[in-house]
Image (cartoon, rainbow, N blue to C red):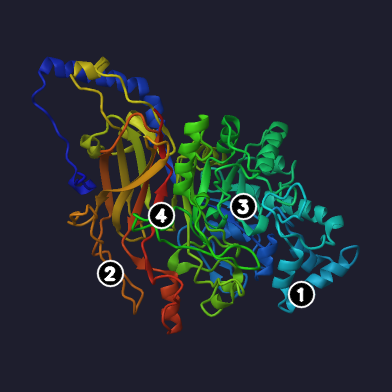
Amino acid sequence: MLTRFITRSERACEFSSKVPSALFVLLVGISMTLTVVSSDRVSAETFRELLWGDTHLHTAYSFDAFLNGNRSADPDTAYRWAKGLPVIHPYHRARVRVKDPLDFLVVADHAEFLGVIRTLYYNVHDGPGAAFAEQVRNAFDNGQGGAMFRDVLPMGVVAPGDTKDPISDEGAPNALPIAAFGEQIRRDTWAETTAAADRHNEPGKFTAMIGWEWSSLPSGANLHRVVMTPADGETARTFMPFGSDESSYPDDLWAWLDKTTQETGAEFVAIPHNSNISKGYMFGETSLNEAPYTTESARTRARWEPVIEATQYKGDSETHPELSPEDPFADFEAYTSYIQQNRQTYVANKGDYARSALRRGLEIEERVGANPFKFGMIGATDSHSGLSAYEEDNFWGKMALDSTPETKLKYGVGRGVTGWNIGAGGIAGVWADENTRESIFAAFRRREVYATTGPRMKVRFFGGWDFDKKDLGASDLAKPGYSKGVPMGGDLAGRPEAPGGLRGLLGRAAPEAPSFLVQAVKAPRGANLDRVQIIKGWIASDGLSRERVFDIAWSDDRMPGASGSLPPVGNTVDLETGRYTNDIGESELVVVWTDPDFDASQRAFYYVRVLEIPTPRHSLLDGIALGTEPPKEHPPTLQERAYTSPIWYTP
């Protein structure tokens, strides 16, 4: 099946002379009346602006960032970088700068030992912590910080037999000798962090959101969440960030968020990240304590976790070739190293990836009537250098130590990870009413957000029952999008009755399947687009979920082959120079697509994936700079992409 689509340059308005003039006047009047009724809502939504930001940035206040060479980049440095100002790199001390400033940033330092190691190293020379502070300084200055991290500073790891142990932990080291004075350091650091956010917050221009990371890591299974709030610093200083040292259970985090909201009025969302290395526990069939999901527990999780981080430095979490074997683009930026001292063989589990989690959510909802995995998707960096660097040609590594081609081999020694395993990405696109804490937070709540692996592709995605190719001629696709459907992150209401109202007057039957309006525009500094796809998941008659990838719009004059697959777009990357051209691809793809396999009785979700033409990966650029062959960890080129939040259909 060849999907019909047109690009912006080919759009045309259609007019029919078959409608009698009197009826035409009547219909115009009805149309004008309908427009007036909904004009306030639609006009407000069409003015939503696309904002770009990073919700996952670490500074020297995170103990692992300090351990890995970030001794100087604090929250002030992070915000200045995000605003586009030149800053000093914390390791090699060069002046660095992001090409395009961000619209918002969340400094999300680890709640565990917040600021403690940095303060011990620089400021503690006498008193009860002096001896341990000297041990810290000696270890770090002698290159033994890694051993201290492994042996003294566990994150969310608890001893066997402890009731907080969710996955039969292998045990924890001896208690830290900083408990007596560490809490005051954490409070002082939290006060500094929240004050910096307020100083840099400029409503309408730049938003500094307050947040932290809850870093549960039982048995090396990554269960981390970034917690974000629209509260101001004064409110945030009335509580301390909840850490995994208080509990490794996500349920306890959500309970704390609920309690703190009631006590302070602050709102929160928790954003899971790196589900790809969660050993199947992030989106498990049951809750972490092995309790089956109930209607209440499913709704609780969906309330606190409306968005997940689908792509970042430590790999892509959309899907995996073993889970989506019929998807030729599933093998992208794979990261297969668990966070633990003794490396285990990587296994891709259904609970590790967004697409299989969305499918599992439908299956759970079929049983209990609520979906715990009804989430939108964003990208973020997880940078620990204090610099939100997500561009392939302006990438400064995950840690400060792996910020140069020569030092990338030193990162992660002993667990099979180098700086070239790390990907340069991603970033969050947010459709918000304005650039303020409240508006950005509201967009996360309603899931009107999407992920890219770095490039700032503009993507709109609407679902409804009445979209047709005439809508492609709109000067602003948001107008028909919001007036005739729901945006990404939304719920598609059931099929309208037929015939009735204006539809009956026009003699039109009710649509048999929903239609989707999609617009994808290349990043201003980026590569052309290869294709736009819709990924559908649904519940089949046997009660199990299925998935299918549809190519719905593509560039150039390619045609699907006999198998229905679309030929590759080509590759213009020069492996000798690291340059590419936009001689292939399209700058914009716009399409109305109708699901050809729709069954009104089946639960389903739909999300958009946009692919760029191939471009050089940062590892290729490093190899060229070093005058060597490109590192073998990943292919030298990649197809950057965007993932929208889904639209759900419920019978």
The residue that label 2 is drawn on is 572
| Disc on the earlier residue, 1 or 4 | 1
Q: What amino acid type is highlighted by mark number 4?
A: Arg
In which quarter of the view is residue 402 placed? bottom right
Task: Check disc 2: other Cα within 10 Å, few if <14, some if 14-19, many if 20+.
Answer: some
Mark 1–mark 2 CB contact (< 8 Å): no
Seen from this angle, which residue lies furthest bottom?
Answer: 627
Q: Amino acid at mark 3?
A: His
The span from disc 1 to disc 4 (Cα, nearest Å) is 42 Å
C-alpha span from label 4 to label 3: 26 Å
Rendering quarter of residue 81: bottom right
Classed neighbour count for the residue bearing mark 3: other residues with Cα under 10 Å, few (<14), some (14–19), many (≥20): many
Q: How far is the residue under mark 1 from the one under mark 2?
A: 48 Å
Viewer-nearest residue: 472 or 634: 634
Location of mark 3 (residue): 224
- Marks 2 and 3, Cα distance to the nearest angstrom? 38 Å
First of labels 2, 4 by sequence position: 4
Q: Residue at x 26, y 61 (%)?
A: 568
User: Mark 2 belongs to which amino acid?
Assistant: Thr
Measured from the top left, where is residue 172 in percent x and y?
76, 60
Q: Mark 2 and mark 4 in contact? Answer it, CB < 8 Å.
A: no
Q: Amino acid at mark 1?
A: Ala
Q: In front of the other: label 2 or label 4?
A: 2
* Disc nearest the viewer among 3 and 1: 3
Q: Nearer the viewer, mark 2 or mark 3?
A: 3
Q: Nearer the viewer, residue 95 or 51?
A: 51
**Image position, residue 550 (x, y; %):** 29, 47
- Taking the view exactly as shown, the residue that stands out farthest to the right is 127
Q: Secondary structure at mark 1?
A: helix
**Which dot marks residue 456?**
4
User: Which residue is tagged 1?
Assistant: 139
Q: Are marks 3 and 1 in contact (CB under 8 Å)?
A: no
